[in-house]
Image (tube, rainbow, N blue to C red):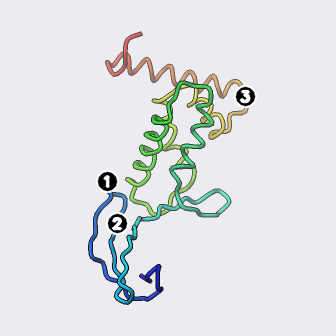
Amino acid sequence: MHCPFCRHPDTRVIDSRSTEDGAAIRRRRTCSSCGKRFTTQETVLLMVSKRSGVTEPFSRDKVIAGVRRACQGRPVSEDSLAQLGQRVEESIRATGAAEIPSNEVGLAILGPLRDLDEVAYLRFASVYRGFETLADFEAEIAQLRTERSAATAGGGGDAD
């Protein structure tokens, strides 16, 4: 690691700590040449492979921005969007893969979004799954109703 002040190539780690969420390690370093101290952060990069063949780093902010568009005009707080973004990232990291296809990111969004807001879920699903007809929407709504009935009958949901 080069010193950011004098560019000397020899620095020494004086302290290492895990961040609050455990996704990164912060290291406090000192330069053996100029004596200045600085902090570095190490994270594991999760890469997303797009349909075009391009790969890019996973971005929780990009997930949240896409979901925010689907939630436009819905009673969904920024805090709820941030929690959804965290759930999506955690589920993707839990796969253990260093690179995942973009469609898996979309699939990881659908479940938490359905739990958050069904209308926003339909909006997102209609774009993600490429709904082309009214029948596509009707089939998805029927599936939501079936799942809700099963959850209610099984004691997993609230009685209306």
Q: Amino acid at mark 3?
A: Thr
Q: Residue at x 45, y 24 (%)?
A: 147
Read off the residue under disc 1: 20
Q: Amino acid at mark 2?
A: Arg
Of circles 1 and 3, the one toward us is: 1
- Which of the marked residues, 1 or 3, is nearer the chain's N terminus? 1
**Dot 3 crowding, Cα within 10 Å, few <14, some 14–19, many 20+:** few
Q: Amino acid at mark 1?
A: Glu
Q: Helix or strand or loop: what does disc 3 sit on?
A: loop
Q: Residue at x 47, y 30 (%)?
A: 116
Q: Is residue 132 left or right of residue 34?
A: right
Read off the residue under disc 3: 133
Relative vertical location of residue 107 with respect to residue 75 in this rendering, above or below: below
Read off the residue under disc 2: 26
Q: Is label 1 in contact with label 3 (beta carbons under 8 Å)?
A: no
Q: Position of residue 143 (x, y in %)?
A: 53, 25
Of circles 3 and 2, the one toward us is: 2
| Residue closer to the observer: 38 or 50 | 38
**Dot 2 crowding, Cα within 10 Å, few <14, some 14–19, many 20+:** some
Position of the N terminus by quadrant: bottom left
